[in-house]
Amino acid sequence: MIYEVFRQEKKGAAFAHAGSVDAPDATFAEAFAREQYGRRQESEALWVVPRAAIHTVTDFADELNKTYHRVDGYSLKAKLKEARERAGTARAS
Amino acid sequence: MSAPALLELADDELILGWRDSEWTGIAPSLEEDVAFSSIAQNEIGHARALYELAARELGTTADELAFDRDPSEYRSAPLVEQRRLEWAHTIARHYLYETADEIRLAALKQADDADVAGLAAKMDREEQYHRLHARMWNERLRDEPRYQEALRELWPLALGVLAPEQRAELAGRVGFEPVDAVERDRQSEELRELWEEMTMVRRSVPGATW
């Protein structure tokens, strides 16, 4: 059974995904998580969660259909190139 | 603490570290491989620290004590010398050894010698994780006939890890009746084979500085 391990680096910090361990039960998952993510004072706390308990959501509807609301909807690179050309400071490539 | 007593401990930790490391790469799962290899490495680290204490007293070095003695001079307990590439026996040995080692370390932490007491306390901190690991496996395998058989087979050897006055405590913790212990005075053929392998590189260029 796969358990996902989340690690808190400092008190008060948000938990971040550290990795996963394959273990027969929660006791083994805890021991393996301690070994891999907790024995060297690198963590303040761990969350060890069965992967099956995690509800994954990916199907977001595009409610606005306005690409500039999305980080991938605006190509900064292209805009910068245009701006540089207008300003006459385009880099020689 | 006398050098011979330190060497008993150091040899136990070195030889067991070696035996446990034989699982590196072939343990039942990758996670267990990482865990057991890490335990093996800890034991060898403890051996190094103990050899250093003994070396100071004997006017030699940790490396010379670990690798340059004749196999007949090692003081390790027969429990740790056995080559056990079988998981039930490996876990049975691990559980019995860690339980015995906890009793031994508790006594050492009270030692008059501040260096010994300090090292015992440091080792005990790492051993907490080993004990957690050993108990977890013992709990999981305790109803398996193969595991029970392995425990019974290794029990007289486990008693030999401890001084006679500490053995009743081990029997109480493990829940077995005290029997005649297999003492440290016997040199196993398995230790000789291990010694050949363990000292091979060092013997290949005598006197070299690595």
Image: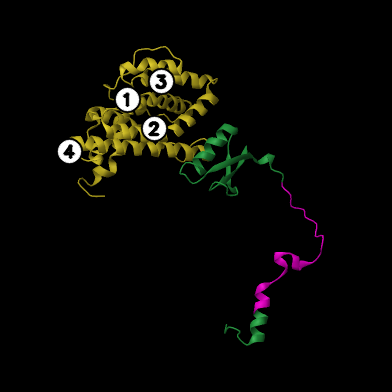
Chain colours: A green, B yellow
Closer to the N terminus: mark 2 or mark 4? 4
On screen, residue B52 versus residue A78, left or right, reads left
Which SS class for mark 4?
A: loop
Q: Is A45 included in the stretch rendered in magenta?
A: no
Residue located beneath label 4 in the image: B59
Label 3 secondary element: helix
- Can residue B94 be seen from the camera position used here? yes
Q: CA distance from mark 3 to mark 1?
A: 12 Å
Identify the subunit bearing mark 3.
Answer: B
- Of B39 and A88, nearer the camera is A88
Whole-number angstrom distance, CA of label 2 to CA of label 4: 27 Å
Q: Tag 4: residue type?
A: Gly
Dot 1: chain letter: B
Residue under pointer 3: B154
Q: Do tags 4 and 3 sit on the same chain?
A: yes
Residue B29 visible in the snapshot: no
The residue pinned by badge 2 equals B124
> Secondary structure beneath disc 2?
helix
Residue contact at pointers 1 and 2, CB within 8 angstroms: no
